[in-house]
Amino acid sequence: MMNHIPKGKYKPYPKIDLPDRQWPDNTITKAPRWCSVDLRDGNQALINPMDMNKKLELFTLLLKLGFKEIEVGFPSASKIEFDFLRKLVDDKLIPDDVTVQVLVQAREHLIAKTFEALQGVKKATVHLYNSTSVAQRKIVFSKEQDEIIDLALQGVDLVKKYEKNHDGEIILEYSPESFTGTELDFAARICNEVTHRWGIADNRKVIINLPATVEMATPNIYADQIEWMSRHLNDRKNVIISTHTHNDRGTSIAATELALLAGADRVEGTLLSNGERTGNVDIITLALNMTTQGIDSGLDFSNINEVVEVVERVTELPTHPRHPYVGELVYTAFSGSHQDAINKGLAYQQAKEDPFWEVPYLPIDPADVGRTYESIIRINSQSGKGGVAYILEKNYGYHLPKAMHPEIGRAIQALSDEKGRELEPEEILEVFKKEYFKMPKHIELQDFTLTTEDGVSKCSVKYSYNGKTIEAQGEGNGPIDACKNALMKNYKNDFSIKSYAEHSCGDKSSAKAVAYIEIQSKEVLSCFGVGTDNDITIASIKALFSALNRAFS
């Protein structure tokens, strides 16, 4: 096969000179500081940017989820961005423990406009940035390193100038934009110049955001860059290292997690990965990854359906059905072996006393994110017998005996093959009823009475057999045995009872009895019947007739 890509068009990213790297041996033990950039980075990437009402709805959701740092926009960039921040201030919608963040470039009229929008905000982060990468310097700005540093320092001086007249706390955040394409020694130099000019101190910490504005290499490279920077930033104890990863290579989650191992303190991202190009890192996935490791993320995703519904509405973007933790199908098993393992795992989890989650194929309990068990197992032509039994049990209360699973599984699979699609629970129930209640009947129960004396059951059974009404009496060691002995006086098909099971179904006040009987004969090795009635004895006799009709019709 010929390679149509010219040789030399792409080159591997160079390794970072960090032979004593420490991050591979580290473990994430606590959640980072989270900052949502949905209202800014996410909003700028939408086909239809959010209006005021959508912005307010999303801001309210972010507060509900527990975010304490929220980038609310770029107030100097447009009227709606400015007006949104003013509405938050004027309507007193910013809680005292929440820091709003605003983005701005190093230009005086933009910084002046930003501080006008911030008037009345008690605590704000002013996020200053300029591009530092080799490509940006060479292609976009035609500037040398010293000129790029001068731009950054001019911005710091302007923020300090307007900070003096601001009635509230201002935190500086600086981003060497396109950090992953910037030489590390230059990135460290410009960041140290910025923090020094700002006047970094114990009571004047600075956020240094190191964005993977474009994801250019494997996640371990980003981790090396973060650890290298952590070693080379002056007054490190007063620097908050923040990450802001994009998903160009599809590894933003891994890159962020490795960056946390490498010393990052803070994460900027969005819900459901909305953002430019392939999107920003998904904070939901990151947070729930921590949950599965026993770490309190500090964010509340206990009602994930609400989060998805709000985000989809305000962004007008759909969520992929396989999106981690939140997609429609991520807690769903079609495979028969998966269904069987999950079914057994859920039963095991319910039976044991300790809460440790041990269900195969489910890294998190769906209930912990507000999802229900009904959607875990769904049925198509690839599904197994255990999955069908699970649907009948969880949706309709039928606890099928294990030996019965293959029998009903074959019937369901035949219908799924015929239709060529997934079957709905209602369709599965209908097949079940057709197989065990609505089958052709050559023998049909009309009446049954039972008496017991000295441990012996005596019955009188009235039934129709091939169109003829018959009454017969029998006795045995129980109702089913007595009924079988009565039937055998006129019934031509010899059979024996192989197994029996029963349970109640429904609420206590309206519970009905369900019985399952398995019969066998010389011709039929195994055939089940099902019966339901308010009386368990009658349910058992109905199950016997069901089995006979299925075996010999």
Image (cartoon, grey):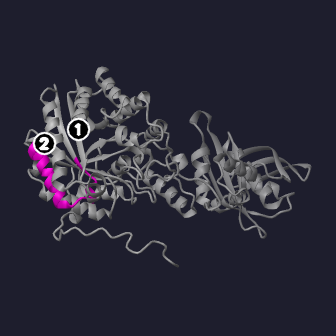
How many residues crowd around disc 1 within 10 Å: few (fewer than 14), some, or many (20 or more)?
A: some
190 drawn magenta: yes
Q: Is residue 399 visible?
A: yes
Q: Residue 70 in the image: state x and y as whole percent.
A: 30, 37
Q: Which residue is mark 1?
A: 107
Q: Which residue is mark 2?
A: 205
- The answer to which of 256 and 111 lies nearer the viewer is 111
Q: Quadrant of the C terminus?
A: bottom right
- The answer to which of 432 and 291 lies nearer the viewer is 291
Q: Is residue 379 left or right of residue 209?
A: right
Q: Residue 486 in the image: state x and y as whole percent.
A: 80, 54
Q: CA distance from mark 2 to mark 1?
A: 23 Å
Residue extending furthest right?
468
Residue stretch in magenta: 175-197
| Residue 541 versus residue 520 in the image, above or below | above
Q: Is residue 453 visible?
A: no
Residue extending furthest bottom?
1
Q: Secondary structure at mark 1?
A: loop
